[in-house]
Amino acid sequence: MGGLVVLIALVAGYAFLRWRQRKAMQAATAAAPLTFDVDNDGLTLRKGKSMVAWMRWSDIRSVRAFKVDCYAHDSIYFAVESVAEGAVFVVNEDHWQFKEVVGAFEARLPKFDRSGS
């Protein structure tokens, strides 16, 4: 009987440790959303409360639109490139701030025209 109690305790302990490990992994991999702060000076990209990147409007070299075929639908993207080497970000139409960012491009980038003409 004593061996059975020890076996049950070991199995319960193992199950508890696996549960805690899964919970810790989920918390570690839960990505904070990427957000944009738009102001008169430029765009600030944040992940959670941390600043990831900042681009002044005058430093934006290009904004390129492209679409990705997702079989049942197309997904629209804008790739934004800065004059700083390697400073690029991509925003997808599924991002909750997509319209705000595109509106900021239209208002602040003189050559931006999403109509393609």
Image (cartoon, rainbow, N blue to C red):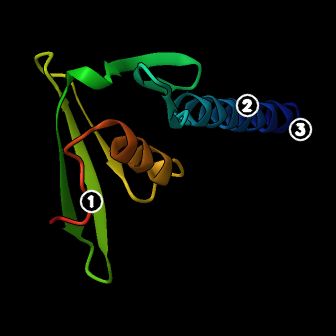
Q: Residues within 10 Å of mark 3 (few under 14, many from 20)?
A: few
Q: Amino acid at mark 3?
A: Met
Query: Label 3, label 2: how many angstroms apart (C-alpha)?
Result: 14 Å
Could you tell me if the residues under marks 2 and 1 are in contact, i.e. CB atoms within 8 Å? no
Between residue 31 and residue 10, name the one nearer to us.
31
- Residue at (89%, 38%) from the top-left corner? 1
Does 63 sit above or below residue 59?
A: below
Which numbered tag is attached to residue 10? 2
Q: Residues within 10 Å of mark 1 (few under 14, many from 20)?
A: few
- Residue at (55%, 28%) from the top-left corner? 28
Q: Quadrant of residue 45?
A: top left
- Residue at (62%, 31%) from the top-left corner? 27
Residue at the spot of label 1: 114
SS class, disc 2: helix
Q: Amino acid at mark 2?
A: Leu
Could you tell me if the residues under marks 3 and 1 are in contact, i.e. CB atoms within 8 Å? no
Residue furthest toward the bottom? Answer: 72
- Horizontally, is 37 left or right of 23 in the view? left
Q: Amino acid at mark 1?
A: Arg
Residue furthest toward the front? Answer: 110
At which x and y percent is residue 60? 21, 28
Q: Residues within 10 Å of mark 2 (few under 14, many from 20)?
A: few
- Residue at (54%, 52%) from the top-left corner? 96
Between circles 3 and 2, the one closer to the viewer is 2
Query: Label 2, label 1: how many angstroms apart (C-alpha)?
Result: 63 Å
Between circles 3 and 1, the one closer to the viewer is 1
Total numbered badges shown on the rendered structure? 3
Could you tell me if the residues under marks 3 and 2 are in contact, i.e. CB atoms within 8 Å? no
Q: Which badge, 2 or 1, comes first in the chain's sequence?
A: 2
Q: Quadrant of the C terminus?
A: bottom left
SS class, disc 3: loop
Which numbered tag is attached to residue 1? 3
